Image (cartoon, helix red, strand yellow):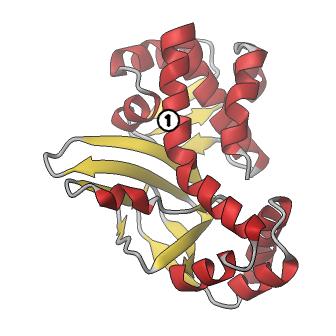
Amino acid sequence: MKQLKIKKIEKTLAYAGVEQEIISALNGNVLKRTLKKGELFPLDKSVGMLFIDDGFIKESLVRKSGDFVTMFIWSDHQILVPNYTWYDFEDVEILYEALCDTELTIYPQKSVYQLCSSSMALFDFFINRSQMSLSATREFWVVANKVGKHDTLLIYLTVTFSVLSHKGKNTLPISMADLSSVTGCSRQHWSKLLGELRDQQIIETSYGSITCLDIKKLTNMCDPDLLVIFARYFQE
């Protein structure tokens, strides 16, 4: 099983053009960590990259006042690169929380930075991933203002469940607060849409999770051009 997971990481990095010798060096220096549901991952600058072997991680931007924005929901087989630029602001903290029992592979920052200096492809990948969650969140907000919240929420659900279906999953562990935060749309908009989709037997909802019953019907409800815009943020 461990070898299978390592190969999935290799495939992702190789797709980005990272050289095989760099990938091998990275995989020779990793740590494993299992988080229980609701457990926070104590991020510090010793962490270079996180690979989610199995589970879901919520990435949130939190201020000392208690205000927070859910930046992204990361699922298994995705590579998460912490965005340390937020540490330039004294009142801001980035938190990573397991939405269910989650297994992580941790790449030390020291080895990642060292190898970035000898691999432009890895450097580009590292920088692009560190900005991905913020870019995706902003994109959702922009589209919500331009094309309407209903279409934006449909797109979010469709792309998310399309990715999960390729992994043999159909349930997303997420709260209404996180749905609102990650898309910039109100709970009222989400409640209305989820109610419509339940009535059409496209989804089922329970406390803290949404299950997709018919991904084809959900996809057919979306504007295909908008799907293309968002899909790039969910590529592995």
Q: Secondary structure at mark 1?
A: helix
Which residue is tagged 1? 137
- 45, 158: nearer the viewer: 45
Q: Is residue 123 left or right of residue 20?
A: left
| Image spot of residue 197 (x, y percent) | 57, 16
How far from the left and from the top, in percent, is residue 20? 86, 78
Q: Residue at x 80, y 72 (%)?
A: 10
Residue 155, above or below 66: above
For the N terminus, the quadrant is bottom right
Q: Residues within 10 Å of mark 1 (few under 14, many from 20)?
A: some
Question: Is 213 displayed left or right of 80 in the figure?
Answer: right
Q: Measuring 48% from the left and 13% from the top, which residue is drawn there?
A: 145
**Is residue 52 shown above or below 108?**
above
Residue 154: x and y in percent read 60, 20
Q: Hey, what amino acid is under mark 1?
A: Thr
**Residue at figure coordinates x 63%, y 90% from the top left:** 29
Residue closer to the observer: 59 or 88: 88
Q: Is residue 173 visible?
A: no
The percent coordinates of residue 170 (x first, y second) are 65, 41
